[in-house]
Amino acid sequence: MSKIEVMQGDITTLATDAIVNAANTSLMGGGGVDGAIHRAGGPQILEECRKIVARQGGCPTGEAVITTGGKLKAKYVIHTVGPVWNGRPKDDELLTWAYENSLRVAVENGVRTVAFPNISTGVYRFPKEQAADIAIAVVQRFLEKESALEKVIFCCFDAENLALYQARLSKS
Ligand code: ADP
């Protein structure tokens, strides 16, 4: 059975070990999924983000950090920063790193089930088809070499992303 699942919904409601946040480099919250996660998870998440900022000055694009899930059902939130899309080859690379580093941080923290939003496809304007290709390729490659992860969920918010992921994963 595939370890990859696709669903449509609000990622803040999921009971996976960790959910991934499409954060920004400040780690101080924002709109979209970032705002929804901080609202649902409560102030403890921002408190831990502040400590990370004090220690390392934010989170560079493509990297990932982990905090408590606060009041969420998920134990952890993994905050990663996708690129703002500018149409450069570097954008693909940075989105790859965002997924890869999130998965690495998950495994390092004993996470066995993790859910991703469609990173960079909101305010950061990354083309959805291209982002879906990258996300699926990174996750499939990671699952081939890392057996500790039991489930990776792509939690799509909009119907367009849901259709893109379903089409790609039904073929693989
Ligand atoms: P980015 O700045 O990385 O583009 P956004 O939060 O603007 O981040 O959008 C990333 C994706 O998250 C978009 O596809 C958006 O539809 C989706 N999204 C927004 N709110 C939620 C939510 N509560 N659960 C899951 N996905 C969400």
Image (tube, rainbow, N blue to C red):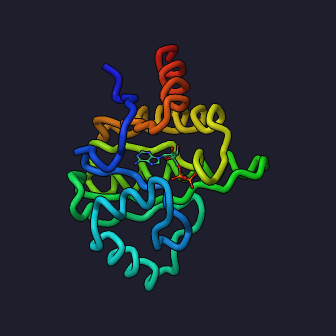
Q: Residue at x 43, y 61 (%)?
A: 35
Count of marks placed on residues: 0
Q: Quadrant of the N terminus?
A: top left
Q: Nearer the viewer, residue 36 or 101?
A: 36
Compared to residue 14, the image places residue 110 above or below, namely: below
Q: Residue at x 51, y 42 (%)?
A: 118
Q: Eyeballing the image, is 106 above or below 30?
A: above
At 57% from the left edge and 34% from the top edge, which residue is drawn?
Answer: 132
Q: Is residue 96 visible?
A: no
Residue reaching furthest top?
Answer: 171
Q: Nearer the viewer, residue 157 or 15?
A: 157
Horizontally, residue 160 falls left or right of residue 146, namely right
Expressed as whole percent of the image width and height from the top left, the position of residue 22 reads 49, 55
In the displayed structure, 159 sits above or below 157; it is: above
x%, y% of residue 17?
Answer: 25, 49
Residue at 27%, 44% in the rendered image: 14
Near-viewer residue (58 or 42): 42
Q: Position of residue 142 (x, y in %)?
A: 45, 39
Residue sitting farthest toward the bottom: 54
Image location of residue 89, percent across then percent down:
76, 47
Residue 138: tell me if it is visible: yes
